[in-house]
Amino acid sequence: MKRVALLPAGSDPFLLAYWLRHYATWADEVDELRITVVGQHNPVVLDYMAACAAKVPHARIIEAIPQRTDHGWTLRRMLDMSADAEHVLLLEDDAFVRRPGVVDERFGRIERGAVDVIGTARDNTDPPLIARCKELWGEPWIGPSGESGYTLYPCFVFARRSDLYRTDGNFGAAGWRTGEPIPGLGIAAFDWMTTDGRPQERMSGDTFTSAGWQLRSLGLRVEGESAYRSDAAHTMAAAQDAPWFHVGSLSTGVGCLFLPEVGSGTDPNLVALIRVPGEIRDWHKRMAWWTRVWEKWDGGIPGYHAEYGAALHQAMEDVGAEPDAIAFWRANYDPLVTWPEI
């Protein structure tokens, strides 16, 4: 029974290099790691990323897509290119497994027939659809971190490839206008009102939300686990000996906040957005990781490394990032790191 891990990686070469060093600590628990690089078109950088993959056990880049693409579309394409895999693990390059044995244990439960799907639980959809989930499946599962939900992140999903193909194959974010059927929930979208009184004629779900509902509606035994993605969950993850943790949104760095594909500086519209009161808080968390992977460097592509560092620090200055806040997040994540960083 072949186990294949699928990693849709972003355009950040130092994040991927760092992630692969973490992967090396549990690489023997899968038969192969297949990587698609999205949004990177610099041939020097792509060669470096391929070389990093070649340094760790049975990992390879199967495709490089120069433009940024929908995450769900990329997942579907990677599944289509993995017809030899019986069991798959969906991963993201901003999420890290903390202990050897974690991946093997989850795959083993599916292979023994104890469960059909294992994934990290969330709800990122409209309140009326959460209420519909409760009608169908009762109270939501709640993990030791307090995270809960009826659907799944597209990360740390363990499943039979054949079961994922029993869904409609749309693993991306989705929206439904009033009257359109919502896969997995057995209802059509309807008009609804937000808590602050704004009428809505559309319903939506984030990446993999609809796929998660469909897996449940098929009668598959879906087992939820904590993602350790929320701020509160991060602070307790080390104490709980969490199997993994998920930073989130690190794809907004290279090609977005800094080193954009068009222009030479940070997008002024993005600067204005980040400067909105309260918005920069989550960006501080991301900056803690971008600075971390830049500093924990293996010495490859020094010219790009220098350019990366200059662009990142300029962008941090442009948006008014607070060094103390970034340092706080660096320290917050330190206890969660369980692998050699360089």
Image: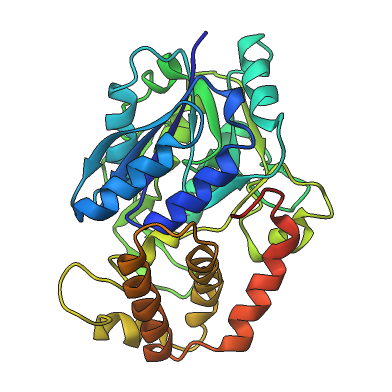
Comparing 69 with 294, the one in front is 294
- Which of the 4 image quadrants contains residue 114? top right
**Does any portion of residue 193 appear in the rendered image?**
yes
Instruction: Name the residue rendered at 34%, 41% in the picture.
Output: 50
Q: Residue at x 63, y 87 (%)?
A: 324
| Residue closest to the eye, 341 or 26 | 341
The image quarter in which residue 149 lies: top right
Q: Left of 42 or right of it: where is 62?
A: right
Q: Residue at x 51, y 29 (%)?
A: 57
* Direction from residue 299 to residue 222 in the image, left or right: right
* Residue 131, percent from left and from top: 55, 47
Task: Indicate whether 24 appears above or below 165.
Answer: below
| Left or right relative to 192: residue 108 | right
From the viewer's perspective, tell me whether residue 153 is left or right of residue 45.
Answer: right
For this rendering, which residue is in front, 138 or 71?
71
Tell me if residue 222 comes above or below residue 179 in the rendering: above
Q: Residue 191: x and y, percent?
A: 34, 55
Q: Which residue lies furthest to the left in this view?
A: 262
Q: Can residue 40 be seen in this view?
A: no
